[in-house]
Amino acid sequence: MKTKDRLLRAVFVGMAVAIAWFIRGDYGGIWGVGFCGAMLGTGFAYVSGQRNMFKWMPLLAGVAAVTLYSCRSYWEPFHGYATNKTFVNYAYGFFMLILQGGGWGCFACCLIGLMLETKPLRASEWASVVATVLVAIFVFYYVVVDLIGFHVTTGPLRTDKVIGLNGGVIGLFVWLILSKKHYGLKGAFFGYIGFGLGVAGGRFVANVRDYGTWTIGDWYVLQGLFGRFENIMEFLTGLIGGTIFTYGMLGKKAPDFPEDKHSKLLSIYSIFFLLAGIPIVTRIMTMSGDIHDGDTGGTKLAKWTQRIAPYHADPAALASMIPTVVSIVCVLATIGAVVWLFLYLRDKHRFAAFPVLCLSATMIVMQNIEHQYLLRPFNQGWKGMLFAGTFLLMLLHVIFIKKPEVTEPDEVAERVNWGRWLLGVVVVYAFIVALSGPVNAGRKGDVSRDHYRFPAGDVQQVVPWGRGG
């Protein structure tokens, strides 16, 4: 596969995951993270151009959605360290963000690789890898935290979940190497470095946004195209992570999909879980209360009314219509799931882009309605423009860029240039740290909210840097 072709396909997946992670920044929780995994799995299967991958698409996306949620953990203090003005703290903060983001992406991406291994894994092998990861999580956490006494954060914001998470990563890599699961190992590696650099890179760009007296949102042209970039960190996490993973993993010929009834039935369940289940449960959760602010259903309606009151004569009437409109979107999403099922059963792989575009469009519309971006003036930071611009690029990508099946021999498709990629990670990290000194020094905001890992214990009670996982 030519580098240009590989990159164009990878960027499509990056854009799809970027939209998902951007929306996850507003929703959070299981369904926000599950949406990211769904876009990663469907997007990767689509850009491969392979008929067999269309058959694998529901399971790849379903597994990625569930696994991304199970690996989620909070990371707020690390963002605080990364915005600090002292070298030791921001260098440590960005390093920990790489570990945190890498732990998020590693397992889901590894499972995509394992499911596409030339020789399918036996039940005993699946049990073995799960047991190895779980044991590694508890042993590593016990040794580092309980025996050695090291904590990645200090004070009231203490959280050591990342230690156990990366212990599981170490156990996973050991199992993959000993079991000679080369494509699964490749997936774990590119998932780790992709989403690790995505989180760290997104944080750095967010710091640049807050530098000096200007922000990206103040630039009229960029604001017109992309809104105010409130969730730029999440957007870049998905864009960088999805692009790097896909770029590294493309080229392997997918094995034949199992034709047994259990695999087909599981695929059908996955189709409805992904295209209808995620929107429906998101509607239930967000209409009944705000999972971040702890709102109840009654105060939710009051908040909506208050948000749009400055712009409309009867805000209460408009706000009361939001649940009904979102419910209609969920009905349309269910119809979309039926269409995908029809395409799947008829093996219409030419329409493999449909699930990616349908789920993206559903969640974009839901998020813009539920957060009233469509009811606010354009200059009030309408996030819908970012979604519209990115979704339009995805649509143009589908229409104008052909994706014929291009495969490589397994020995080529499973190969990784470990030295070059690891050197690239080190270079990017060094670049971020080198520029963070002047960037953080000129960053706007309340410096009293900076977090300090060093000296230990000097940590503020306030958590201002995002909502976490």
Image: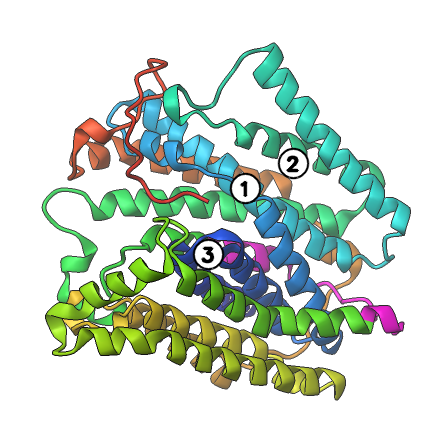
314 or 434: nearer the eye? 314
Counting residues from the start of the chain, the first of labels 1 and 3 encountered is 1
Q: Is residue 402 above or below residue 87?
A: below
Q: Is residue 118 left or right of residue 5?
A: right
Q: Position of residue 363 (x, y in %)?
A: 45, 71
Q: Give the x, y percent position of residue 420.
A: 57, 42
- Circle 3 residue: 238
Q: Is residue 450 above or below residue 407?
A: above
Q: CA distance from mark 3 to mark 2?
A: 20 Å
Element under disc 1: helix
Would residue 402 be seen by someone viewing this image from the given angle?
A: yes
Q: Secondary structure at mark 2?
A: helix
Q: Earlier in the sequence, mark 2 or mark 1?
A: 1
The amino acid beneath tag 2 is Val
Task: Identify which residue is drawn at 49% across, 19% down.
Answer: 151
Residue 251 appears anywhere in the view: no
Chain-order first, disc 3 or disc 2: 2
Q: Residue at x 47, y 35 (%)?
A: 426
Residue drawn 80% across the image and 47% down it:
181
Look at label 3 and name its amino acid: Gly
Give the labeled residue for mark 1: 102
Q: Is residue 281 left or right of residue 1?
A: left
Query: Which of the 4 quarters of the picture holds residue 322?
Result: bottom left
Quadrant housing residue 143: top right
As shown in the figure, which amino acid type bears the numbered disc 1?
A: Gly
Q: Which mark is residue 169?
A: 2
Residue ranking furthest to the front: 298
Membership of 262 in magenta stretch: yes
